[in-house]
Structure formats: structure tokens, C-alpha cells
Amino acid sequence: MKYLLFLVTLCFSLNTFAYNEKHFTPRQIYLMKLAEKEGAKVGFPKTIQAILWQETHAGTYGPVSYSTAPIGQKAYCPMQIKLGTARDVLVKYKMPIPKTEEELLVKLLTNDTFCIKLGALYFKMLHDKTKNWSKAVLAYNQGLGGMRAKRDPGDYVKKVKKVLLKDVREFNRRYK
């Protein structure tokens, strides 16, 4: 399993380059457009783009979080979704659930549409629960338990707002 994660991470790393002021990579363009499409389905196209950008710079950081958490507790795919969160979203929206954690993990790591759709549905679920955009953004990053603490130690919400106003706006201006 560790070798699979290493190979997938290596492939993404070789295929993705950092964003600069004048250029989005083809993969970033693809993921940002996909985020806008899936976000529109839940009523938050630009928010989903901003979360995608804040989490992984639209796939630049690779498909697995850099946390020291064990394999099953890490966040995966460009939207940085944990396996438990993925299962919760699949159950809530009555979507087919892979039989094993390994199948779910492989689907998250290899299917960008699945990943971004889950991220968009997760944000919608959080927004429906909190009835507040900022609280839903914070909960996306920290979970509902972290959001209830009413603190944002990493200024995640401010960062997402900044991305929304700068990077997402710039992307949509260039690639519409």
C-alpha cells in the first residue's frame, strides 16, 4: 500500500508544476474548471475553486497530505478529503460506497471528478448544517468539532477569502 501511494505521488509530482503569476499548468486548469462545474451543482462554484486552490494549489502538492497521520487518517486527492469524510458524504447523498477502504482510497487518488464532487458535496453538507459560509469553510478545514471551537488558528477562512478574490478571480478571467 505504501508503494502505491509513493508511485501515485511521484506521478503527480512529475506531472505538476508550481503556479506563477503568468501561468497555470494544464492540470491546474483542468482541476479548477472541474471544481467550478461541481461547485455549481451545489451552488458554490467559486468557493469550491478557492478551497481546491487553498488545499493543494489545484493539485500542485500531490494527492496525499503531508501530515504525519497514519495512512487511513491522512487527507487525499486535490480536495484533501479523509476516508471517513468520504464515507460520510457517500452515505448522506446515497452514492455507491466502495467495498473496502483500499478501493475508496484508490478512487480518491485516481478519479479527480469523484474527489472534487465529494469535496463540493461535503462543503454543501457543512453549509447546510452551519447556515454560514465562513463557518462552513472553517469546518471544511477543521471538521465540525474544530469549527465549534470558534477559532481559526491558521486563518484558513481569511486565506480562502483571499484566494477567492485573487487567484480564483484571475483564473476565471483568463480561462472562461
Image (spheres, rainbow, N blue to C red):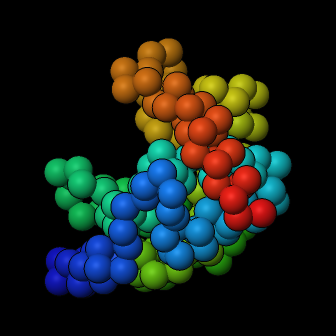
Instruction: Point out the residue furthest to the top here.
Output: 150
Residue lying at 44% horizontally and 64% vertically, measured from the top left = 59
128 or 21, which lies in front? 21
In the picture, residue 164 is in which quadrant?
top right
Residue 22 appears in view: yes
Quadrant location of the C terminus in the rendered image: bottom right
- Looking at the picture, tell me which residue is in the foreground, 132 or 38: 38
* Residue 67 position in % (x across, y down): 23, 50
Q: Is residue 49 above or below residue 100?
A: above
Question: Which residue is rendered at x = 29% and y = 74% of the image?
Answer: 13
Question: Where does residue 148 sit, x and y in percent of width and height?
Answer: 51, 21
Please state the horizontal and vertical placement of residue 85, each as a whole percent of the image.
50, 54
Q: Nearer the viewer, residue 74 or 157?
A: 157
Residue at x 37%, y 61% (from the top left corner): 18
Lateral position of residue 80 relative to residue 170, left or right: left
Q: Residue at x 52, y 25 (%)?
A: 158
Q: In screen coordinates, is 171 left or right of 110?
A: right
Q: Left or right: where does residue 91 sit relative to residue 44?
A: left
> Which quadrant: the N terminus?
bottom left
Q: Is residue 38 visible?
A: no
